[in-house]
């Protein structure tokens, strides 16, 4: 089993008759082979037979090159003869990464330590061979997950800044639209801007989903219910030539996840399955309770052993090759022609699954089909209803209260001031925590609401709220954020009493949330 360093098997004489040695060899966890000057295998332990898929007696007397993939054999023979011409004197264990081949033709990565002895029959090499497939697999998964982490950070950063810009663009555009009379020729232009801004916001949202920074509202749900509820809509997405089958597990456990996100993940997987079957076929959605054991967790990076709920989406489509499989979760990776794929479907699924502390695995064979398996941790609590208040109608938006707006981005700050002022509110603005507290001190009248960005230059919006509440205990607080910051994303905080307005927000959303909070009984925050 050669590498590029010219080290090779030498010949090991009869290993010796001691029973002790035999016992050691037979119980070793590595494959151990001895090879003579001609390249013949002279002895092999039980593990060697297992690893290479031969019966022990099949190996003895064979050329060692039998265990090497064909393209590498000639090179190995050269290395072997070089080695035997000038055998190294010191006993050595050389760690080398090489490929080996089983009897059934399957190739696998191995690590080999080489040593040799001089015996009465000349020099014999002893090779200690470890199958390192599992380790290689984990290494690859690690590289993959680090890559996804880096790309996620990039995507999240871009999305965050874009959210601010989009809030400004669509906000001012909205102000413009409100001023233009219905028959004004310029309305069409402004409406085009609005449409483009909406598309950009949808794209930004997908990037946020991928980077796991989307504002989510997890609650205890049952995936069977989510899938059943979505099945009507799924059927509309696929042509007649594709059959859609749902096989729900009758006693499916619950999971804690954002139902909207899970539906989104399901839709994306089904659309991909559809696209993989242009001539028709079958999509199977299946759920099950599964136990992921230590063995699974050992071979799947970042998955803790435990009880999971699985949702599998399978198709009988064209499948994908290993190279495609390596890239499918990357944002903007697509094998589809322009206009048919954005390459964001699976990256959002990936982000959704990870954000909900789950895992996703894909099995695919060319021309046979593909299965995506999503695992979410199983919980024992009963299902929960949606607790979020519904959006209130727009007509009760107007107000006259005083609102302190804290936002470091001047474009967004001015926009919010304009919107709120135009709707009757008294607005105070500040760029950071110090300015906010100063303004509060100088302002004699009441401050009914603090509307603050979460990320601010010196201290977070949470700090602003904390300090402000000391001097103005009744003040209500509404946070704005381009993405879930750690300060507020911490689930218990988010679930309980933090009010959050995700950016980009529309005119209506801003006014409606502000009004909602001001109208809520009693002090809030
Ligand atoms: N069910 C599937 N069968 C075969 N290939 C798939 C399947 N799902 C995804 N893929 C591959 O993964 C790529 C990325 O998918 P996705 O992120 O959803 O982007 P898009 O669908 O826009 O191409 C696809 O272009 C396709 O090559
Ligand atoms: Mg897709």
Image (cartoon, helix red, strand yellow):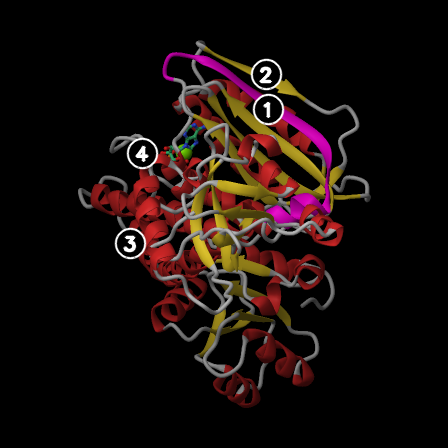
Q: Is residue 333 left or right of residue 517?
A: left
Q: Crowdedness of circle 1 by 10 Å Cα count: few (<14), some, many (20+)?
A: many
User: Which quadrant of the structure image shows residue 386?
Assistant: top right
Find the residue positioned furthest to the top.
241
Does residue 314 show up magenta in the picture? no
Magenta residues? 278-300
Where does the image place residue 479, in percent across and percent down from the top left?
56, 66
Residue 308 appears in view: yes
Q: Quadrant of ligand 2?
A: top left
Q: Which residue is mark 1?
A: 285
Element under disc 1: strand
Q: CA distance from mark 2 to mark 3?
A: 49 Å
Could you say which is closer to the camera, residue 428 or residue 60? Answer: 60
Please give the count of numbered marks on the rendered protein: 4
Q: Which residue is mark 2?
A: 245
Sequence-first disc among 4 and 2: 2
Q: CA distance from mark 4 to mark 1?
A: 24 Å
Residue 505 appears in view: no
What residue is rendered at 66% in x and 34% in y? 310
Q: Is residue 90 above or below residue 197?
A: below
Q: Which residue is mark 3?
A: 176
Disc number placed over residue 335 in the picture, else none: 4
Q: CA distance from mark 1 to mark 2?
A: 6 Å
Q: Crowdedness of circle 2 by 10 Å Cα count: few (<14), some, many (20+)?
A: some
Q: Is residue 344 above or below residue 318?
A: below
What residue is rendered at 23% in x and 39% in y? 183
Where does the image place residue 337, in percent across and percent down from the top left?
26, 30
């Amino acid at each position: 089993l050669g590498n590029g360093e010219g080290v090779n098997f030498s010949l090991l004489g009869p290993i010796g008759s001691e029973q002790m040695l035999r016992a050691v060899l037979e119980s070793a966890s590595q494959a151990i082979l001895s090879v003579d000057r001609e390249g013949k295998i002279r002895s092999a332990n039980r593990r060697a037979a297992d690893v290479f898929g031969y019966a022990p007696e099949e190996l003895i007397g064979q050329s060692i090159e039998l265990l090497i993939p064909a393209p590498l054999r000639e090179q190995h023979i050269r290395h072997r003869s070089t080695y035997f011409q000038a055998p190294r004197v010191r006993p050595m264990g050389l760690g080398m990464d090489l490929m080996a081949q089983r009897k059934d033709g399957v190739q696998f990565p191995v690590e080999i330590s080489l040593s040799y002895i001089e015996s009465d029959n000349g020099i014999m090499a002893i090779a200690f061979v470890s199958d390192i497939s599992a380790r290689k697999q984990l290494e690859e998964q690690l590289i993959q997950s680090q890559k996804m982490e880096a790309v996620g950070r990039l995507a999240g950063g871009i999305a965050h800044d874009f959210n601010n810009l989009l809030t400004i663009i669509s906000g001012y555009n909205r102000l413009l639209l409100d001023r233009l009379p219905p028959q004004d020729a310029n309305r069409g232009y402004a409406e085009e801007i609005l449409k483009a801004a909406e598309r950009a916001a949808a794209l930004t949202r997908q990037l946020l989903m991928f980077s796991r920074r989307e504002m989510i509202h997890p609650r205890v749900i049952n995936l069977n219910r989510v899938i059943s509820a979505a099945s009507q809509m799924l059927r509309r997405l696929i042509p007649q030539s594709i059959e859609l089958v749902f096989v729900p597990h009758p006693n499916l456990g619950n999971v804690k996840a954002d139902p909207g996100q899970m539906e989104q993940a399901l839709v994306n997987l089904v659309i991909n399955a559809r696209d993989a079957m242009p001539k028709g076929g079958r999509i199977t959605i299946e759920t099950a309770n599964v136990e992921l054991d230590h063995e699974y967790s050992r071979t799947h990076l970042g998955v803790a052993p435990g009880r999971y709920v699985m949702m599998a989406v399978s198709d009988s489509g064209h499948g994908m090759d290993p190279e495609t499989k390596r890239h499918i979760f990357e944002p903007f990776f697509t094998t589809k022609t322009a206009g048919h794929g954005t390459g964001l479907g699976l990256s959002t699924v990936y982000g959704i699954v990870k954000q909900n502390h789950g895992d996703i695995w894909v099995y695919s064979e060319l021309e046979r089909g593909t299965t995506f398996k999503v695992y979410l941790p199983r919980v024992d609590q009963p299902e929960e209803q949606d607790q979020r208040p519904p959006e209130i109608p727009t007509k009760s938006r107007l107000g006259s209260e005083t609102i302190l707006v804290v936002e470091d981005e001047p474009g967004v700050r001015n926009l919010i001031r304009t919107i709120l002022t135009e709707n009757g509110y008294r607005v105070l603005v500040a760029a950071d925590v110090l300015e906010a507290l100063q303004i509060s001190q100088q302002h004699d009248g009441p401050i009914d609401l603090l509307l603050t960005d979460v990320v601010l230059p010196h201290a977070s919006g949470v700090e602003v709220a904390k300090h402000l509440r000391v001097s103005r205990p009744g003040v209500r607080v509404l946070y704005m954020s381009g993405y879930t910051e750690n300060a507020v994303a911490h689930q218990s905080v988010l679930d309980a009493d933090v009010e959050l307005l995700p950016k980009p927000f529309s005119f209506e959303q801003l006014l409606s949330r502000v009004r909602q909070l001001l109208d809520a009984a009693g002090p809030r925050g």
